[in-house]
Image (cartoon, grey):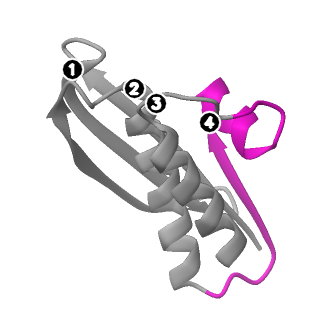
């Protein structure tokens, strides 16, 4: 069995400072299984990177709620999030840094 999580985040109408939201699609063996989304908030502390990390955190939450039998793949289009989570890039500073720390902790807890 292959479980795929596809996450994304967005801030509109301006980044930073707009309204943030995230989305998550879950596929099982290539077929749509579940989708959900959420609102992250708005204001000067809201950025696309925060919204992307919120989407990843939603994937980690859902993964923690199931007992997957087989391969799990998490996909996203944020180079920052993907490269930081893979350890290729460091999280030096930025509004997203607490979300990065939470994602690293969530990943290690899985």
- Residue 52 picture location, percent across and down: 46, 37
Magenta part of the chain: 67-90
Nearer-N-terminus badge (1/3)? 1
Crowding near the residue tagged with mark 1, few <14, some 14–19, many ≥20 C-alpha atoms within 10 Å: some
Q: Are marks 3 and 4 in contact (CB under 8 Å)?
A: yes
Q: Secondary structure at mark 3?
A: helix
Q: Are marks 1 and 3 in contact (CB under 8 Å)?
A: no
Outermost residue toward the front in this view: 93
Label 2, label 1: how many angstroms apart (C-alpha)? 9 Å
Nearer-N-terminus badge (4/2)? 2
Does the image show residue 110?
no
Q: Which residue is mark 2?
A: 48
Q: Could you say which disc has been placed on residue 17 in the image? A: 1
Q: Which residue is mark 3?
A: 49
Check the image and report above or below for 58 versus 6.
below
Nearer-N-terminus badge (3/4)? 3
Q: Could you say which disc has been placed on residue 81 in the image? A: 4
In the visual, does 49 lie left or right of 88? Answer: left
Q: Quadrant of the C terminus?
A: bottom right
């Amino acid at each position: 069995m292959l479980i795929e999580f596809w996450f994304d985040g967005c801030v509109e109408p301006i980044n930073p400072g707009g309204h943030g939201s995230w989305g998550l699609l879950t596929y099982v063996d290539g077929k749509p299984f579940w989708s959900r989304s959420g609102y992250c908030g708005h204001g000067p502390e809201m950025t696309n990177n925060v919204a992307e990390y919120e989407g990843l955190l939603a994937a980690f939450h859902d993964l923690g709620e199931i007992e997957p039998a087989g391969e799990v793949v998490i996909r996203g289009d944020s180079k920052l999030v993907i490269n930081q989570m893979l350890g290729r890039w460091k999280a030096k500073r930025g509004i997203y840094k607490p979300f990065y720390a939470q994602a690293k902790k969530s990943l290690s807890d899985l």
